[in-house]
Image (cartoon, rainbow, N blue to C red):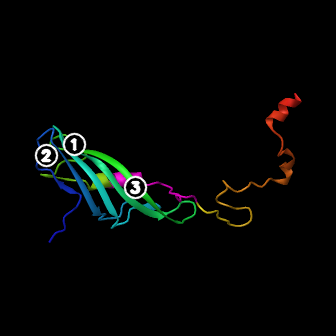
């Protein structure tokens, strides 16, 4: 028996009926890995899709939102991170014609896989960071990847200027 592709939706009742609309809620495990960076949606991770299918004169408009989770590593400290992914999409699946379209109806069905994949992958952060901030990484004397909370050491040669401000300069004039 051939496994049914969860991305493929039957739209027979919408074809050539402009103004008709259907809403569907889809829940299934991602059949493949989505993304290639430091974070990705692993195969088997749950995809929660709220889908709205609208019949138009040109074809069927598929719009909605995808909710899932991406797992990977923090770009700063390489600790494991898990990020919620909530992204919206909209794509017109055109009726067959002589004009080229990115997506066309295939008989009575449309395949949401490229639309959902593109939306999720483009929503993944390029350099993900820990949600609560990274722990300070001490890489040796004077080297730290996180310096926001750490006091900055002053070079002894510039220490005499540490108390000088622009206001002091105006007072002298």
Q: Left or right of 72: which side holds 153?
A: right
Labels 2 and 3 touching (C-beta < 8 A): no
Label 2: how many residues lie within 10 Å, few (<14), some (14-19) or many (20+)? Answer: some
Q: How many marks?
A: 3
Residue at 74% over, 65% down: 141
Label 3, secondary structure: give it. Answer: strand
Q: Which residues are magenta?
A: 117-133
- For residue 164, which numbered disc appears in the image? none
Label 3: how many residues lie within 10 Å, few (<14), some (14-19) or many (20+)? Answer: some
Q: Nearer the viewer, residue 158 or 168?
A: 168
Which numbered disc, 3 or 1, marks the residue that appears first in the sequence? 3
Residue that carries the numbered disc 3 in the rendered image: 85
Quadrant of residue 99 in the image? top left
Q: Left or right of 151: which side holds 101?
A: left
Cα distance in 3D space between marks 2 and 1: 21 Å
Cα distance in 3D space between marks 3 and 1: 32 Å
Residue 35, visible in the rendered structure: no
Quadrant of residue 145 in the image? bottom right
Cα distance in 3D space between marks 2 and 3: 30 Å
Q: Is residue 25 above or below residue 29?
A: above
Residue that carries the numbered disc 2 in the rendered image: 14
């Amino acid at each position: 028996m051939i496994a049914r592709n969860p991305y493929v939706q039957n739209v027979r009742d919408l074809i050539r009926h402009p103004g008709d609309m259907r809403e569907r809620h889809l829940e299934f495990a991602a059949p493949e890995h989505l993304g290639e960076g430091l974070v990705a949606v692993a195969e088997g991770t749950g995809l929660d899709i709220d889908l709205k299918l609208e019949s138009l004169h040109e074809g069927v408009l598929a719009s909605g939102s995808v909710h899932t989770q991406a797992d990977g590593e923090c770009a700063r400290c390489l600790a494991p991170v898990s990020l919620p992914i909530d992204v919206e999409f909209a794509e017109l699946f055109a009726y067959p014609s002589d004009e080229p379209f990115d997506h066309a109806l295939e008989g009575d069905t449309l395949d949401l896989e490229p639309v959902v994949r593109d939306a999720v992958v483009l929503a993944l952060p390029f350099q993900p960071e820990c949600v609560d901030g990274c722990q300070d990484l001490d890489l040796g004397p004077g080297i730290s990847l996180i310096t926001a909370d750490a006091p900055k050491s002053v070079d002894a040669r510039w220490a005499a200027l540490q108390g000088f401000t622009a206001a002091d300069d105006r007072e002298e004039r």
